[in-house]
Amino acid sequence: MSQRVSLFVTCLVDQLFPEVGLAMAEVLERLGYETEFREAQTCCGQPAFNSGFVAEARGVARHFLNVFDGAEVIVVPSGSCCSMIRHHFAGLFHKDASSKQATENLAARVYEFSEFLVEVAGIEDVGATFPATATYHDSCHALRDLKLKEQPRRLLRNVRQLELREMELAEECCGFGGTFSVKFEDISADMLDSKIEAILRTGADTVVSIDPSCLMQIRGGLSRRRLPVQTKHLAEILASA
Amino acid sequence: MPDREQVLHKVRTALGRRRSRPPDPPPALSLATADLDLEERARLLIDNFPGQCLRAGSPEEGRQYVSDALAGRRGVASDAPFLRTTGITSLPGVASNIRDESTLRQACLEADVGITSADYALADPGALVLLSTSREDRIVSLLPPVHIAVIPAGCILTGIDDLFHALPDPAAVSSSMVIIAGPSRTGDIEMSLVLGVHGPRELHVVVV
Amino acid sequence: MSSSFHERIDVALRDLTLQSSIQSATARFAEGRRDQVEEPTFGEYQQLRTAANQIKRHTLDNLDYYLEQVETKVVEHGGEVIWCYDGDSAVKAILRIAREHGVSLAVKSKSMTSEEVGLNEALEKEGVEPVETDLGEFIMQLSGERPYHIVAPALHKTRAQIAKLFSEKLGIAYDEEPTRLTMAARRVLRDKFQRAEMGISGANFVVAESGAVVLVENEGNIRLTTSLPRVHVALAGIEKIIPRAGDLAVFLKLLGRSASGQRLTSYTSFLSGSRRDGEISGPEKFYLLLLDNGRSRILADHEKRQTLYCIRCGACSNICPVYRRIGGHAYPGAYSGPIGAILTPQFQGAGHEPELPFASSLCGACAEVCPVKIDIPRMLLALRREVKKAETRDRPFHWEKVGFRVWSWVMQRPKLFEQLGFFAQAVLPSSGRGEWLGSLPGPLKAWTGSRDFPPLAPRSFRQLWRARRPRAATLERESVARSEQTTSRSDSAGRRHA
């Protein structure tokens, strides 16, 4: 098996959390996949799309299509970006038949990282070891748009020395929501408070998610409160031997 | 343009046409009618009924239950044939056979207990179905603080699907059908349950 | 509403009593719903949602036909249909009916539609006393507030507040006990029911084939409103139609469970026309008002037409992390919660409260619980596009538009993107030890009000990747150069399409 996997390392991961991208590559390579990183990639366009700027999002989406033209399989360490590509790209090109066709071909080949491991590779145990008491936060778009609930949990349960504890309201939003987090800072912060309280009640020392943006929000709150709880992307857990 | 034409014109324009045309048939009704026998339906109703229940072995037993429940208080009964045959309309303290609106309303406002039959009962979820007629008026089950329904076991259907299977268009029978699936209740004050806010606080069914 | 959206949000977030009232009530509703739909014997839940969605779609796609069918059937049953193009016309029609029948007191059962058209104010002005009879609505009417929640109007009120209100307005002794408060309201309202000449209701459903309105409730006030007065007026939005009585088998199962976690509410009334020959009680006159008031405009929008599927169960509000914090009064208009956030802008025009569609993290919990499967987040996104379109039509150099233009331009030029990354690393504050930043200027100031922000990585992923795989990276850089060229080509093509 040496299928080639193209990595989409989202803008947030590229600039703020490169370790997540590297961890994802590590895991995939260890499983025998050949990885490629197309350097012309930038972003999926979601920030503009969610803010109502559709032409601006379309330009970025078209760039994405060009960059990933011909890629067999694309793996993304973010449920939200994956959902953008899979569920919203087509609508951006509804007046442009050839781009629309291209997005539809592409959408079928884009996978969120845990989704790819469990649903495509058929792997639930990557042989990782990570000593921690962890709790898993469901990111909204992974959970509701991509229907990823059990996949990341199964992968976590098979990590050696990791105890997985469910938090209350694991499915409730952390309050990030892109520009919502600054436009409605007060609501966003209140949602974050509830999320952090739920995390603390589990007694876990590690919060795991499959969306860097949720992790940015949650860790931002933990850091402000100086709480000794670390945040990890699933890929980082699975990459540690 | 009169409102009627204006609304219809806007709706048609929205739908991209100039005049109405008969639609394709609506999605097929999926009325899941269960195959329970009468005994099972009666048992389910007793289990599910959101009030007090009695399975009466005979009309006399049913009549006795109502008489005990009345406990000397004032009752008003509808003129349903089944109440007549079970002798409930002739219980002491029970006003019945009232055909005049204001007399009936006054009797219902003053009564402690309203007694009716029902056209149907639903076993699951437990409920009564009453169609308003000259002999089963809609306010008898509404105004008094206690409502007792005395019904023949034969009127019990399995559920709501069976109701619309048996009665595809309630409007063909009466101007008013009510499905009663519990006592009058509210949770509007701090979500605390209070019974009898506007209608009966107590609901009984006697299955004969 | 004099205060701004943000001010109203602020007021709600600061009121801790209010916060706990909303949280506990919505949590109980949401749990009740979840227990019901997850009940193992209720395996048909998802099929029912699909069926409900299809029936609504079919009905709205053929609404002109069904509206005329309703009219024919209502008339057959001795009722009268009044078409109302807008709220004003509905109010005028009700006032005319009140005058014709010499009405001085009208009892009302809960109707969001009557809130929408501002009926009570108009009745009062004409000397007709409107009395809300749903307990929650009665409390709201006494306190001069609008409903806080689609199904539980007084959800935000504590028993102490209600006790104070009742003692002031009803002249009874202060008593916080919910049963005694409820009974006090019952006594007042029983009297109103007996004296009212007109009953005004809404409609949960209008059955086309039967010419009937269907009303769902727990208290019994709707039965009283529609049974005792001589005149019954039902005010229904034109989207409330379902084709057949049998369709209720689908909708009734969904509505009670989704709204209050009940398999079936205490009373479901199926009312067609006025009292018939031989029937003892019931209204002598029945009027059905079919209200458009912007609904046909929503109908014309293919993408957002599904907004009209709503059966007003309130499940979306109960699950919404935003509603559960800002409450019903922060929303403009009669409808609150996620459904209000998509309905109100479509009724009032997106420019009326432009921030409303943005007050969502797009978490999608609302769509997940919606019994008729309205894709609320998708509607919010569509409304956001409309707001921005209107905004930039007026102000082509609006900072946000310019910002996203520049952003988009950069994101299509990977080399520039990378260079800006280098630049940012050089100028942005960084602790150097990877610690998160406690205060940032500009647009990120709002972020650091309550959270720390991550420092830029000292080396971006693409830098690290090159270091990791020097040879592959060289090849990649060449391909970037190639794609830069294609980007500028497709860019001009893109503008043509956009």
Image: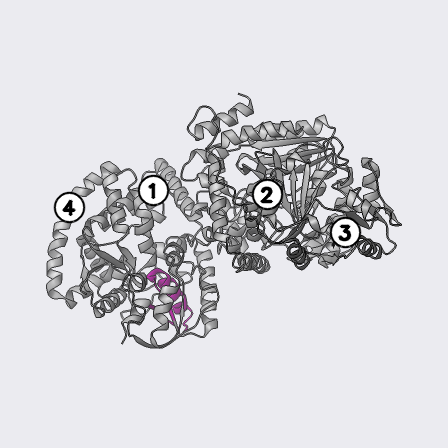
Chain for mark 1?
C
Question: Do discs 1 and 4 share a chain?
Answer: yes
Q: Is residue A110 above or below residue B21?
A: below
Q: Count neighbours of disc 1 (C-alpha within 10 A) and say few if under 14, some if 14 to 19, many if 20 or more.
A: few
- Judging by the rendered image, the residue that carries numbered circle 4 is C486
Question: Do discs 3 and 2 share a chain?
Answer: yes
Going from N to C along the chain, the mark reached first, 1 or 4, is 1
Q: Which colour scheme is used?
A: one colour
Q: Is residue A217 magenta?
A: yes
Q: Residue B165 carries which label?
A: 2
x and y, in percent, of residue C147 in the image: 60, 46
Structural distance between the alpha carbons of marks 1 and 4: 30 Å
Structural distance between the alpha carbons of marks 3 and 2: 26 Å
Are the residues tagged 4 and 2 within 8 Å (C-beta)? no
- Amino acid type, residue under disc 1 in the picture: His
Q: Is residue C311 above or below residue B125?
A: above
Q: Position of C111 compared to A152: left or right?
A: right
Structural distance between the alpha carbons of marks 4 and 2: 64 Å
Q: Which of B62 and B125 is in front in this view?
A: B62
Magenta stretch: give its range.
A207-233
Number of the front mark, 4 or 2: 2
Question: Do discs 1 and 2 share a chain?
Answer: no
- Amino acid type, residue under disc 3 in the picture: Ile
Under tag 2, what secondary structure? helix
Q: Which of C230 and C241 is in front in this view?
A: C241
Q: Which mark is residue B148?
A: 3
Image quadrant holding the C terminus of chain C, namely top left
- Judging by the rendered image, the residue that carries numbered circle 1 is C398
Under tag 4, what secondary structure? helix
- Amino acid type, residue under disc 2 in the picture: His
Q: Position of B72 compared to C227: left or right?
A: right
